[in-house]
Image: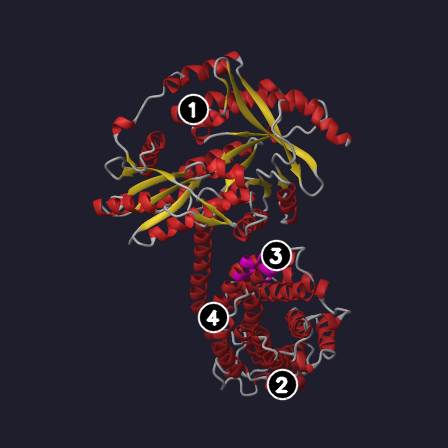
Amino acid sequence: MRLLQLRFGPQSAGVAQRYLALAERHQSLGDRPGAVIATSFALTAENFAGDLAAALSAYERLATEISDLDDPLERYIAMGCSLLLYHAAARPVPYMQHACRMLQLAEEIGHGGLQLASHSNVGIAFFLAGDDLQARHHLEQVVESIELGGWLRFSAVALLTEVYASSGDIERALPLLEAWAFPAQLHELDGSAVAHFHTLGAEVHARLGQPARTQAYLDFLASVPVEHRSLEVPRMLAVVRALHHQSIGDDAMAQAGLEQALGGALQASDAELVLPARFWWMAAEVASARGQWQQACELQARARRNELDCKRDGAAVRRVATQLQTDASARAIEAAQRDPLTGLGNRERVIAVGDRWLAQRMAPIVIKLNVRRFNAINEALGRETGDAVLQAVAERLREACGRFEQALAVRMYADQFALLVAGGEDSLQAWCAIAAEMFSTPLAVAGHWVDVSAAWGVALGPVHGATMQRLLSHAEIALNEDRRTQAGWTVYAPSLVRADPRQLSLISELKRAAREGEFFLVLQPKVRLADQQVVSFEALVRWAHPTRGLVPPVEFIPFAESTGSIKGITAWVLREAMALSHRLREAGLVCGIAVNVSVHDVGDGEFVRTLRELLATTGALARDIRLELTEGAVMRDPATVIDRMREINAMGFEWSIDDFGTGQSSLAYLNMLPVSELKIDRSFVRGAAASSASLTLLKAAIDLGRNLGLSTVGEGAETAEEWALLRELGCSVGQGWFCAKPMPEQDLLPWLQARRSG
C-alpha cells in the first residue's frame, strides 16, 4: 500500500531513492513482485533526474524479471515505467509494443479503468509517431469516458491538448486549456503533467500573440517545483519565453531565452536530446524574426529531420497496432471456438479445422462418442459432479490425442464429444483400440469413483462426406446405431440410414399446423438486472400436434430449416408476436417482444416485404420487435446477411445476436453488425459461479458487449447464484427459469400483475 501511495503522488527526481528503499525492504521480506515494482518506479523517477539513457538501460535489464511475474496486475504496474521512459526518449515503436502488451494485460485483468488508461497509451504511441488522427481517436475516447477521473484523466487531457496543438487544431485545444488550466488542488495531480500542460498553454497563447494569457501561464509555472519538470520541459519553456518576449518587443529577453533553449542543442544528436518538431519550428521563428538567418535555416532543417523520423517510425508503429488487432481477433475466435466447461474446442472448432484439412486433401477421421447413462449420473450425484465427469472424460480424450501427430478433441454439446484425427487405416485401428480401453478404469471425480462407458460412431473423410457438416452427420448416424446395438464401435455405412416415417410427413404437417392453429406462442420475460424490472419478452413457438402431443422445437425447427419450411413458421410467429405486442402497448404494458429468425429468413428477398405487411396488418411498431439471429447464422454468409440486417434495421427493427460465444465471428464483423444486444449463450452462464474458466469467459463476453456499447443478456440463468453473478458482472438483462419459465399469453398478464403487486 505504501508503494502505491507513493506512486500515485507527484513524481520527481527525489522520489527515486524512496522507491529504491522500498525495493530493498520488499526484497528483505521475500516479496519479489513488490521489489520489482518498486525498482521499476525508481527508474521512472530517473526521467526527472536527467539520466534517461541509464534509466532505459536499467529497465531493459529489469524487463525479464517483470515478464516472469505471475500476476497480470503486477506485470501491468511494473511495465508502466517503460512507457514514461520511452515517451521521454521519443521511441514510439517500443512504446507501442509495451502499450499493446499492457492493453492485453488490462483486458485479461478485466478492469475498465486500466483498459481506458491502456487505450490512452496506444494514443500516445501514435502521437509520438506523428499519426495525429489515430492519436486523437484513442485519446478522445479516454477523455470523454466517465470511468476515468483524477490525475489519470488530467494526464489524458494534457496529451490530447498537445495532439490538437501539434496538428494546428487550436480551436479544439483552447477549450481544454480553459477548462483544465490553473488547478486549485495542485498536490492531487501529477506534477510532470501539470508542468507539461501549462508549458503547452503558454506556447499556444504565445503563438496566438496573446501576451497577457501567456504571462498567466508562465506565472503559474513558477509555482510548480522544478523537480516536477521532466527533461524536455525546461527547454520548451525557454523557447516559449523567447517567443513571448519577441512578440512584446523585448529583444534582449527574446535573445536570452533563445540561447537558453538552444544551449548545445544543435550540436546534440537526436538520441542525446529528444524534443518535438514544434520546438525547432518555434526556435526557428524567433531566430528568423531576429534576422539570424543561418541559425534559422539550421533549426528548420532539424525540425524537418524530426518530422521525417516520425514518419519512418509511424509505419512501424502502425504495424505493431495492426498486429495487436489481429491478435485480439484471433483470441476472440479462439474463445468462441472453445468449450468453457472442459477447455476443449467446440463444434465450430472441429468444423473449421476439419474443413481446412479437407481443403488440403487430407483424409480426416471423424469420431463421435456419447457417455452412456450420463443422465443417471447427473440425477444420482448432482449436476456439479456430472460436470466434473465431463471434465474427466475430456482429460482422457486430450491425453489420447497426444499420442497422434494430428488429432483434435472437442465437446459438441451435453455429453457428446467428437474427435478429428488425421491419418489412414493405422490411425483408425489405433483409435479403435484406444476406445476399447479408454474407460476400462473408473473416473476419480469429486470423491467418487464413477464407472462410465461410451458409444462410438465413425465417419471417414472424404469417402463418407466432402464437408465436415456431412461427416459429422454421418458420424451421428453411426453413433445412433452404436447406441442401439451397443457394439462399442460403429463405422458409418449407407445401409445405416433409416428413413423415419414420422419425419417423411413433417413437411405437409408443418404447413397444416400453421393453417389449423396447432402452433402457439409462449413468452419468457427478460429482466433488467439493475432494478429487476421486466423490459421485454422472448416469443418461443410450440407445436401441439393432434396425435403426437407436444412436439419439442428441437424435433421440428432443424428439420424445417433444412427443408425451407422455416419461412412459414417464422411468418406465423412474427404475426402472432406483433399482434400481441400491439395489444400490450394498447394496455399500457411492456410490449417489447423478441422473435428468433433464421438465416433462411434473412436471406429471402421477400422477408423485408413480409415485415412491412405484418406491421401494417397488426398495427405493431417496428421498434417494439427485436429480431434474434444466431452468431453462427451470421457467419455462414456475413456479406449478404449484414446488408440485409442493415436494411431491416433502417425500418426500425432492433437486432440481437443470439447464442453469442458459440460461433466464430471476428471482432471486425461484430463491429459491423447493426445490433444493439448480445445474448450470451447459456453454456457461459451455467456453472460460471463454480468454474474460474467459465467465469472468465462470461465476464469477457459481458465486457465485450459493454465496450461495444451493446446491451448484454445472460441466457439460461436457473439459480439465484447465477442471477446474482450476472448482475455483479454488469450484465444488462437476465433471462431464465430462475425468474420465470416460458408461459402462454393467458398466464402472462396475471404474472405481470402479481410481480407488480409483490
Instruction: Measure the C-alpha gap from mark 2 to mark 3.
Output: 49 Å
**Residue highlighted by disc 4:** 94
Q: Return the mark for residue 255.
A: 2
Q: Which quarter of the rendering shows the N terminus?
A: bottom right
The alpha-carbon separation of the residues under discs 2 and 1 comes to 86 Å
Write down the quadrant of residue 418 in the picture: top left
Among numbered discs 4 and 3, the one appearing first in the sequence: 4
Tag 4: residue type?
Pro
Under circle 4, the secondary element is: helix
Which of the two discs, 4 and 3, sits closer to the camera? 3
Above or below residue 405? Residue 281 is: below
Extreme left residue here?
425
Q: Earlier in the sequence, mark 2 or mark 3?
A: 3
**Residue at screen point 35% across, 39% down:** 368
Dot 3: few (<14), some (14–19), or many (≥20) neighbours within 10 Å?
some
Residues under labels 4 and 2: Cα distance?
37 Å
For the image, the number of numbered tags is 4
Counting residues from the start of the chain, the first of labels 2 and 1 encountered is: 2
Going by the image, does 187 lie left or right of 547? right
- Of 440 and 176, which appears nearest the observer? 440
Q: Which residue is mark 3?
A: 112
Dot 1 lies on which element?
A: helix
Secondary structure, mark 2, is: helix
Label 1: few (<14), some or many (≥20) within 10 Å?
some
| Residue marked by disc 1 | 560
Point 50% across, 69% down: residue: 95
In percent of width and height, residue 694 lies at: 53, 49
Point 48% across, 35% down: residue: 375
Q: Is residue 646 above or below residue 335?
A: above
Q: Quadrant of the C terminus?
A: top right
